[in-house]
Image (cartoon, rainbow, N blue to C red):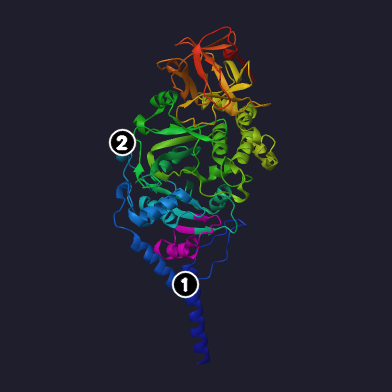
Amino acid sequence: RSFTSKLVILAVVLVCFIFYFKLVDRNLDGSNSNANVIPDPVHDKQISHLEQLIQADLAKQVSRLGDNGEAVALEGEAKDIGEKFLAKIALNEELSEHLSYNRTTPDARNPHCRNLKYDLNVLPTTSVVIIFYNEPYSVLLRTVHSVLNTCDRKILKEIILVDDGSSNVELHEKLAYYIATRLPRDVVKLLRLKHRLGLIRARLAGARIARGEVLVFLDAHCECVTTWLEPLLARIRESRTSVLVPIIDVIDAKDFHYSSNGYKHFQVGGFQWNGHFDWIDVPNRERDRQRKDCKTEIDICPTYSPTMAGGLFAIEKDYFWEIGSYDEQMDGWGGENLEMSFRIWQCGGTIETIPCSRVGHIFRDFHPYSFPDDRDTHGINTVRMAKVWMDDYINLFFMNRPDLKHNEEVGDVTHRRILRNKLKCKSFDWYIQNVYPEKFIPTKDMIAYGRFRGVSRNLCLDDLQQNNEEPYDLGVYMCHKPDVTKSQFFSLTRTGILRNELSCATVQNSDELPFRVIMAPCNNNEKYNEKWEYADGQLKHIETGLCLDHAGLISQEHIVVNECDPMSETQKWKIEH
């Protein structure tokens, strides 16, 4: 009898032990000392409460609402709540909670893509790594379901969710319970980090435990289009040193409308000299290369991209580690995408956009979370990148960010320079000449460049910190000293174009003088940009014959052109650098 009782007790303990581990998140070590390997306790009462919460979430969802990526408008109190979320986290979480986790997306692919066939038996397996920090619960789960719904299990080895120290309680036991009870246990895994490490180190933690042959990094606010994964894997099978990005479509943060810019037009990655990523049109040079090398329809050929945005990309796992993974001394987020972009190209790889792979991404108007102590991790990380990969071009970066020139938080980059030497990587000048020759270099082959200072007064041409994406009035401001800063740095090209990095000076004709001077996005074909001439200290607009004039202006006012007067001191300019 005593023996039987002991067996019963042992069986009960064993069942509880198994059930306990079934309902908690599968915390994985991954050779990372910051990973939490102690499960959170979940008791019977908690289980009942969590089930009620999840049932309430599911009851809130409206069947087929927003399907096919359709926009949705809330009304009444829900609309007001949604607007508060938009103001707080730049995303309509209220609407997201009404949408199914399994809502469908439109098939935005080029029709030629639908004719392609893939042998799943020969494609490499994939680990999809998703980092999240206080991501809206419903948005995160929609991302996970979207991956599950669009990927065949033959090629999807696992989805690794890495919680970078979230404080949002919904992302604790509730998320763990949902994963344990409603998602395939052998596919979806949850790794909790003990402390917030930032995007870069969190991704490394996920990559270390990945078992797939290919790593796919996705942001936690994505929705995938059918057959998005196969084209990425097929290209990596052809070329293991190709790092691939899908076409990234836009999911509106307010109404969750999935929008693509048609199936023919898409952009690739560039950069600005201030260290920020930029979208650019596919250069004509690249289209010429595709016509020569492409084996399929040119519209669906892999397309070289000078950089990548960094949120969504695929890379062979072994190559990820061989090429140097990430700079682990980078904090938070930001700068890692350009660092990886330059490193891949300079060290023998390629970055390619795969047109037959499309993923929707929620782009927010502002970043809702800061890193501890509000540090400029993007700027600091970008300095680390520039010191290793940009060679003498680093001066153009510091011209744009003089505040970072002597920042002591940057730290030592010796180990990354050793990596560069070990990999026998090419120079940044090689990168500019061979990968991104379209990039405007403000100091190369110019008639003059630097600060355009009025001779009679301490006023300089200035963009007045205006948005370069739209046309704006060129202005004047008190000259910055001693360094020439980005807002006052202009170039006069050999072809007579007065410009800064992104915009070219044009004259806005009107009924009477003086005329305004507008900075507008430069045309890739230089013959369509307006021309200027610098002679005897005057800047003359060729088409109108008028001269740049700051007569009567004070700092922060807009510059004009007027009838040329060789005796006028307000039309004389000195160019300094």
**Image spot of residue 515 (x, y percent):** 46, 17
**Image spot of residue 550 (x, y percent):** 56, 18
Please name the residue shown 47% across and 76% down the image. 15
In the rendered image, the quadrant that contains the C terminus is top right
Amino acid type at mark 2: His
| Residue 356: assigned label | none
> Few, some or many C-alpha atoms within 10 Å of disc 1 (few <14, some 14-19, many ≥20)?
some
State which quadrant residue 290 falls in.
Answer: top left
| Residue 112: assigned label | 2
Give the secondary structure at mark 2: helix
The extreme front residue here reads 552
Q: What stretch is highlighted in magenta?
A: 161-189
Amino acid type at mark 1: Gln
Q: Earlier in the sequence, mark 2 or mark 1?
A: 1
Does residue 257 appear anywhere in the picture? yes
| Residue 46: assigned label | 1
